[in-house]
Image (cartoon, rainbow, N blue to C red):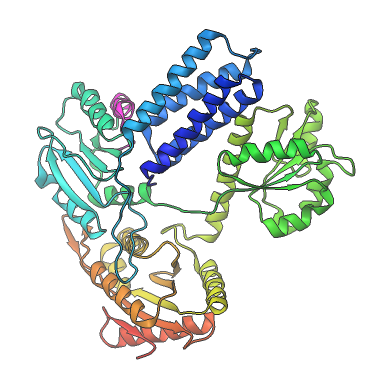
Amino acid sequence: MLCSPEALLQKNQTLTDTWDRYLASPSFENFVELAISINSFTEFLIDKGIAALHHASHQLEQVTLTLFTQEVEHPLPQAAQDDLNERVRALARLTQARANSSLDTLPRDPVFIAPQSMRSARAWLIGHQQASWSELLTQLGYFGMSTEFVSWDQPVADSADAAPLLLLDLSGLPASEWHERIQTLRQRFGMGQLIALEVASDFDQLQLALKSGCDSCLLTGTPSHAVVEHIMQLNECHDQEAYRVLIVEDSKTASHFIHRTLAEIQINAHIVNDPRETLHALKQFNPDLILMDMYMPSCTGVEVARIIRQHSEFLSIPIVYLSGETNVALQVDAMRLGGDHFLTKPFNPVFLNTIVKSKIERYRALRRSMYHDSLTGLLNHASGKHTLDVVLSGIVHEGGFLSAVMLDIDHFKQVNDRYGHPVGDQVIRSLSWLLKQRLRKHDMICRYGGEEFLIGLPHTDAEQALAIMERIRHDFSQIHHPHGDSHFLATISVGIATYPLVQTGDALIKAADQALYQAKHGGRNRVCSSDD
């Protein structure tokens, strides 16, 4: 995921400021704030994939948490303060060195075409022979990535991109040279992404490549289309809403402390001090997780959990109990009656954040699998139609246009019959990647069924939609789909319908499908609008 230098520096400055506050007033409360801030920065680096900084931040986090768990009085002993101070300042220096003054400025197309899925618009492939990688470089070009081959004997040019992509062909390079060469590139491109190619399926080689600074490795013999798939999936950005946590806690002091702790890692939280308001809050706030006090004056957390579980729409929401209860038998019973985890008070706030994030990530992954197509990661049929209705409702309220697009791969049955279903699946994935890269983040993309796709383009009239889809149609027709030692081409046909000429979601889909039929009947590999 891309990270602007400003965001990186601001996040590190927050950490540094927290440390300075502890030095000025070395209380346990300020040390708690420091631990939370370091954890927040470490999670930020993991999320953004900034490996070089993550190592230093992780080491600082480990030292801090060790002191946090010990019975240490504050201020900390001078030796511990000096050690932490050096680590905090070193991390700040490293962050400053890694930050680049240039901002992430991806080009914007006049017809609203904006890249979504690529981390970087430019990549370097560092290797020995360019000819052996020509197919990969060509394939990446189809998806909007400018690539350049550089020999291991040449220096890599400085990148204006804050997060470049470097593909490293390690075949023919002595393993004894891997560590120094990879580490040099990692130090130069701290916020970049390093992918090792042609690595043997050998524990020692994989460990050496990853330990030296590579983010991932692709084994010897991995075909070009699989390398492209890896790069696309690795760099696909699932921009999602901030995590939401419902805090059911009768103590206002405790609930506000939890709220502040979660805010440090950008989690939105809503507090319910009266457990009888829980159901209303669930419907209004739609949380990803519930933090539940075990004992409250009017009822217990277990009773509230059982009431929540009577509602089918809330069955899968994780519930984490907060309590001073240490009786294991009671904890087991509490989890059997609707809970998912138990945190004993007083709890380490960093541990709380970690538990909350991991639970929400698994919850959202499960929910995503229910609403998204497993082959492409796009919305599935049912969720696509629902999302189109939601988007249309907003357009009707705000005013403006909404273009619905039905898209179909031409002669797809012949592709499956001639080349096999795995190759057909790869063609479908290639089209989904192209759509995600060419369309805007708020456009709706759905695999409607088989080789058919449904797209919603809010605030886009028929003329604009026609221009966008015409460009996508052309670009897809240029992609070489590999098969054995050769390749083949595929094309798409497209139908468009636009609100307010067509008034409802179902009517938009039907009108766009009729336009798609016209495109098919007119010879395929073309775009037709219902306005025509």
Toward the viewer: 483 or 502?
A: 502
- Describe residue 142's horizontal placement relative to residue 90 as left or right: left
Residue name at image x 35 percent, y 65 percent:
435
Residue name at image x 42 percent, y 58 percent:
375
Toward the viewer: 387 or 71?
A: 71
Residue name at image x 41 percent, y 69 percent:
450
Q: Which portion, as a residue range, is magenta? A: 203-218
- Describe residue 287's horizontal placement relative to residue 470 as left or right: right
Residue 170, how many percent across, how many down?
20, 33
- Describe residue 310's horizontal placement relative to residue 37 as left or right: right
Principal secondary structure, stretch drawn in magenta: helix
Residue name at image x 51 percent, y 21 percent:
62
Toward the viewer: 63 or 373?
A: 63
Q: Is residue 479 above or below residue 249?
A: below
Look at the image and tell me whether residue 46 can be seen. Answer: no
Residue 131, how many percent across, how many down?
9, 47
Look at the image and tell me whether residue 37 can be seen. Answer: yes
Q: Is residue 354 above or below residue 476?
A: above
Q: Is residue 210 above or below residue 297?
A: above
Name the residue at the front extreme: 24
Residue 371, how many percent across, how many down?
54, 60
Residue 308, how many percent across, how many down?
77, 52
- Describe residue 224's horizontal placement relative to residue 449 as left or right: left
Q: Is residue 463 magenta?
A: no
